[in-house]
Structure formats: structure tokens, C-alpha cells
Image (spheres, rainbow, N blue to C red):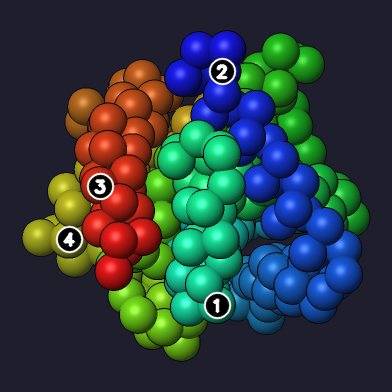
Amino acid sequence: MSAVGGALADGWVVAKRNLIKIKRIPDLLIFSTIQPIMFVLLFAYVFGGSIIIPGVSYREYLMPGIFVQTVAFGAGITAIGLADDLQKGIVDRFRSLPMSRAAVLVGRTTSDLINNIFVVVVMSVTGLLVGWRIHTGLLDGIYGYLLLFAFGYAMSWISAVIGLSVKSVEVAQSAGFIWMFPLTFLSNAFVSTATLPGWLQPIAEWNPISSMVLSLRKLWGNLSSDPAYNGSGFPAEHAIPLAIGWIALILIIFVPLAISRYRKAASR
């Protein structure tokens, strides 16, 4: 078996181990699902009444932003899981076994991707209940979901670097969210970038979160009828290729960085 094949096979074994852990501690899955549902209900029924988006209901405009926020925040589990494995010495145990060194990272990111898929399914049902709909065809709908999962998977590798760079689960939990909040809220996820101060608009429009959200709105037909509310310039006109480019760039930078951090963390 090749090195890549070995890493994938061993990684799947580690992924199954992580998924069994979720089965035994269902609180992990329950709380990762409740949080995005609360965001949907909060913005749809509390803040949504004061936000008017021309040509589309705010709930439909909101849902792509909630989806992207959900997978981005869900990636934080990767940092917590790896920090927990390091702290408990499980990584040392893995190193003593005849398995691929990359299996721990492949397994962790794969199991977190599966967890994200489950949460997105629950979010989709919640969105349908509050009035969100996909107005384009089946292929565009599926393409949007695949893009969403690819983005969540890429974000997991950023979290992997964080989880391998800290020495405790508590720090990993805090560090995983400190950078995520400004990245998510300084975007078009909840409001149009046209409503932001002028100096913030270019930052928000080039934000990878904004590219992902706008891509989903285009693919699912949740755009405003007023072009000003959909952003402007290159990021808005080329949102889908730009989102794919962000995913590729994150993977190119953070996969080798995570592998390097893993080698250092495992040798402590």
C-alpha cells in the first residue's frame, strides 16, 4: 500500500475512533447543533425584523451566512480534539503503533467533517422551517453544499495548527474562537457590506467568509434584487472562483504547517 493509501486507511480508523467518542458523549454533538439553531432563531425572529434586504426575505438572505458560520465554528472542534489527545497522551500511544504518522490529522479532520455534515443537515431542516428555500436547480444546490463542506474541511486545518500549538484544551477552546468571531462578523454573513463604514467595506468584501456566503447566495438564489446589497467589485463578480481559491490557499498553507506542528508536538 502506498504512503497516501496508508495514511487514508489509518486515518479512517482514527476517524471512526473519534466518531465513536461522539456517540458515547452525545453532548458534543448536541451543543454543536444547538448553537447555530439559536443563531437562526435569534436573527430571524429578534434582529431580522429591523433589517430590510430589497427583493428577498431576510431569513433567506441570512441562511447562507449561518451555514458558513456554522462550518467555520464547527472547525474549532479540531483544535479542541487534538489538544485533548495531546494532553491525555493518546498521540504518544498512536506513535507507538505501526500506523501512518499523518493518520491522526487525517482522521481528526475527517471525523470533524462528518460532524459538520450532520449539523448542516439539521440546519437545513431548521432553515426550511423558518422560510429559507433553494430557488435554483438541484445541481446548483448540491454544488453549494459541496463548496460549503470543502470550506469547513479547510478551516479544520487552521484549527489543527492552533490545537497543536497550545498546551491545554482550555487554551485551544479560547484560541479557536478569538480569531473566528471577527472573521465571521466582519463579513456579509448577517448584513450587506454596503452598510459598513467605507474603510471596512474592502476588508469585508475580500474576507473568505464573504466569498463563501455570496457564493451560496448565488448558487441557491438567495440574492437581493438590489446589486448594492450583494457587494461590489472583483470579490462580488467572481465570488465562486474566489471562494474555491480561498479553500485551495488555506489547504496549501495550513496542511504542511499542521504536519510540521504535529511532528514537533508529538516529539515533546
- The amino acid type, in three-letter code, at marker 3 is Ser
- What SS does tag 4 mark? loop
Above or below, 265 relative to 35: above
Measure the C-alpha gap from mark 3 to mark 2.
20 Å
Would you name the residue on which mark 1 appears? 88
Mark nearer the viewer, 1 or 3: 1
* Quarter in which the N terminus is drawn: top right
User: Do the CB atoms of the residues marked 2 and 4 lie less than 8 Å apart?
Assistant: no
Would you name the residue on which mark 2 appears? 5
Measure the C-alpha gap from mark 2 to mark 4.
45 Å
Q: Name the N-terminal-most of marks 1 and 4.
A: 1
Foreground of the two, 155 or 89:
89
Asked whether the viewer can see residue 19, the reply is: yes
- The amino acid type, in three-letter code, at marker 1 is Lys
- The amino acid type, in three-letter code, at marker 2 is Gly
- What SS does tag 3 mark? helix
Measure the C-alpha gap from mark 1 to mark 2.
28 Å
Q: Name the N-terminal-most of marks 3 and 2.
A: 2
User: Do the CB atoms of the residues marked 3 and 2 lie less than 8 Å apart?
Assistant: no
- What SS does tag 2 mark? helix
Mark nearer the viewer, 2 or 4: 2
Based on the displayed image, in which of its 4 quarters is residue 50 positioned? bottom right
User: Do the CB atoms of the residues marked 1 and 4 lie less than 8 Å apart?
Assistant: no
Foreground of the two, 171 or 62:
171
**For mark 3, does the 10 Å Cα neighbourhood hold few (<14), some (14 to 19), or many (20 or more) residues?**
few
Would you name the residue on which mark 4 appears? 200
Would you name the residue on which mark 3 appears? 260
**Which residue: 46% across, 70% down?**
86
Based on the displayed image, in which of its 4 quarters is residue 62 positioned? bottom right
- What SS does tag 1 mark? loop
Mark nearer the viewer, 3 or 4: 3
